[in-house]
Image (cartoon, rainbow, N blue to C red):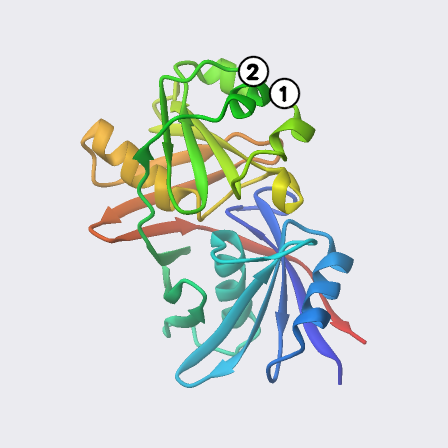
């Protein structure tokens, strides 16, 4: 028997929306270079690898180029895969041991709710190449341990952005969140996420970015629960509830492929 692999569209209610992630259900730990090679072969923004460990699962995430410390859509996809394959009952929480500590997921009325660390931003200066690459004027610039956060005034400007990815890749950061208030009453804020430095020009829907966006907009809007839209070409809806040093991030998921690695 080979290794079970699924491709799951995370933060999506139907196939070919949201953010696709590979999920490899391993029986035991595998060689790091093998996992990196599989992620390069799958060639999605992230491929998740998980195997049983203690009362949960060890979970690691790889882009086609590097391993990353935190990945929301890969975790959401992994939870969905465990429940769909019967590895866990839907009444059971998924527990993941990761580079960012213990992460959990639970099934709530058709949504998957992740419990992640808060990664609130601190105001900072933007490197000159960052703003040149994005062709925008910020109203706020912040930074956390992973990414830059840039707020702009116009959702239209956000949706029309066409960054210089070669220049953006030269900026020392995992990625860049660009965000604005939503013009639609359906959503509190919108965002896009760019990470060419780790091999992802634009990520379709970025769960880990909402560990930063959620606390930021919760403070600005004085709201404890928010609904966000990531305005990539595929697009995706994310519910966010900041709670102290944690952030609850919710989305839906659908499997589009199930197979076996030789």
In the picture, measured across the screen, residue 185 lies left or right of residue 133, that is left
Q: Residue 181's x, y, as percent?
A: 36, 22
- Is residue 91 something one can see in this rendering? yes
Secondary structure under tag 1 reads: loop
The residue pinned by badge 1 equals 162
Secondary structure under tag 2 reads: loop
The residue pinned by badge 2 equals 135
- Is residue 187 something one can see in this rendering? no
Classify mark 2: residues with Cα within 10 Å, few (<14), some (14-19) or many (20+): some
Residue under the point 43% across and 71% down: 96
Q: Find residue 124 and report its image quarter.
A: top left
Dots 1, 2 in contact, CB < 8 A: yes
- Residue 71 to residue 142: above or below: below
Q: Find residue 257 and report its image quarter.
A: bottom right
In the picture, measured across the screen, residue 143 lies left or right of residue 64, that is left
* 1 or 2: mark nearer the eye: 2
Q: Find residue 51 and report its image quarter.
A: bottom right
Q: Residue 6's x, y, as percent?
A: 66, 64
- Residue 211 to residue 91: above or below: above
Residue sitting farthest toward the right: 262
């Amino acid at each position: 028997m080979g290794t079970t692999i699924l491709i799951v569209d995370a933060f999506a209610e139907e196939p070919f929306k949201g953010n696709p992630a590979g999920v490899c259900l391993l029986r035991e730990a595998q060689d790091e270079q093998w996992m990196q090679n599989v992620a390069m072969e799958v060639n999605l923004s992230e491929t998740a690898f998980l195997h049983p460990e203690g009362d949960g699962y060890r979970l690691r995430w790889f882009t086609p180029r590097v391993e990353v410390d935190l990945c929301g859509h890969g975790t959401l996809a992994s939870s969905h895969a465990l429940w769909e394959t019967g590895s866990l009952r839907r009444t059971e929480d998924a527990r993941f041991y990761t580079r960012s500590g213990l992460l959990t997921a639970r099934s709530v009325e058709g949504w998957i709710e992740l419990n992640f660390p808060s990664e609130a931003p601190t105001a900072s200066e933007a490197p000159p190449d960052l703003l040149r690459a994005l062709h925008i004027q910020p109203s706020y610039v912040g930074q956390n341990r992973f990414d830059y956060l840039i707020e702009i005034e116009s959702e239209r400007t956000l949706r029309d952005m066409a960054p210089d990815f070669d220049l953006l890749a030269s900026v020392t950061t995992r990625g860049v969140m660009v965000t604005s208030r939503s013009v639609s009453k359906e959503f509190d804020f919108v965002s896009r996420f760019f990470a060419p430095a780790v091999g992802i020009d634009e990520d379709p829907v970025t769960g880990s970015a909402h560990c930063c966006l959620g606390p930021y907009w919760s403070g600005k809007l004085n709201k404890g629960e928010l609904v966000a839209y990531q305005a990539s070409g595929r697009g995706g809806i994310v519910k966010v509830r900041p709670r102290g040093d944690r952030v609850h991030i919710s989305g839906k998921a659908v499997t589009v492929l199930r197979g076996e690695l030789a």
